[in-house]
Amino acid sequence: MDAALLVGTSKDLLEAVSYHVILKKMGTYKQKHFPTLLGLAFNCLGMTTPADKGEFSHVERMESSFYELGCSINNLRNREGTGHGRPFLPSIADHEATAAIESMGMISEYMMKKLEQSH
């Protein structure tokens, strides 16, 4: 019912999964910058990001798009969501918020499956 809250929650979900992956793989991590956190989690899982060079396979292109999507939704959350406190009403539509939470859920599930496979 609250589009801004959904977008904020979607970012929180992917952030928590990223921290979980990093803690499982590296033991500790203190960085707070979302794109760096997400990139490190992708790296820990052997996933591709736009920073990687070379010809991408179809799966690598998909993973790189997942990274871009996660960062884009983080930016949406920063501008329109509940993050960073806003003194104005958000202009995000319900269908946009639904797409954000479903997308972040999909990326999170993919990452958790990759983590499961790595053990």
Image (cartoon, grey):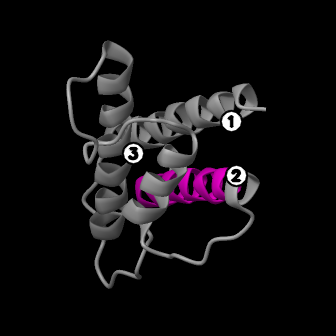
Tag nearer the camera, 1 or 3:
1
Q: Work out whether residue 9 or residue 34 is closer to the camera in this orientation and state it.
A: 34
> Are the residues tagged 1 and 2 within 8 Å (C-beta)?
yes
Q: Dot 3 corresponds to which residue?
A: 97
Q: Residue furthest top?
A: 58
Residue at (51% x, 51% y) in the render: 10
Question: Would you say residue 17 sits in the magenta stretch?
Answer: yes
Crowding at mark 2 (Cα within 10 Å: few <14, some 14-19, many 20+): some
**Left or right placement of residue 52 versus residue 32 in this view:** left
Question: Would you say residue 105 sits in the magenta stretch?
Answer: no
Question: What is the C-alpha distance between the residues marked 1 and 2?
Answer: 9 Å
* Residue at disc 2, secondary structure: helix
Residue at (51% x, 36% y) in the render: 46
The correct choice, above or below, for 30 with respect to 67 in the image is: below
Q: How many numbered marks, from 0 up?
A: 3
> Are the residues tagged 3 and 2 within 8 Å (C-beta)?
no
Tag nearer the camera, 1 or 2:
2
The correct choice, above or below, for 92 with respect to 33 in the image is: above
Q: Dot 2 corresponds to which residue?
A: 25
* Disc on the earlier residue, 1 or 2: 2
Q: Dot 1 corresponds to which residue?
A: 115
* Residue at disc 3, secondary structure: helix
Secondary structure, magenta segment, majority class? helix
Crowding at mark 3 (Cα within 10 Å: few <14, some 14-19, many 20+): many
Magenta range is: 2-22
Question: What is the C-alpha distance between the residues marked 3 and 2?
Answer: 31 Å
* Disc on the earlier residue, 1 or 3: 3
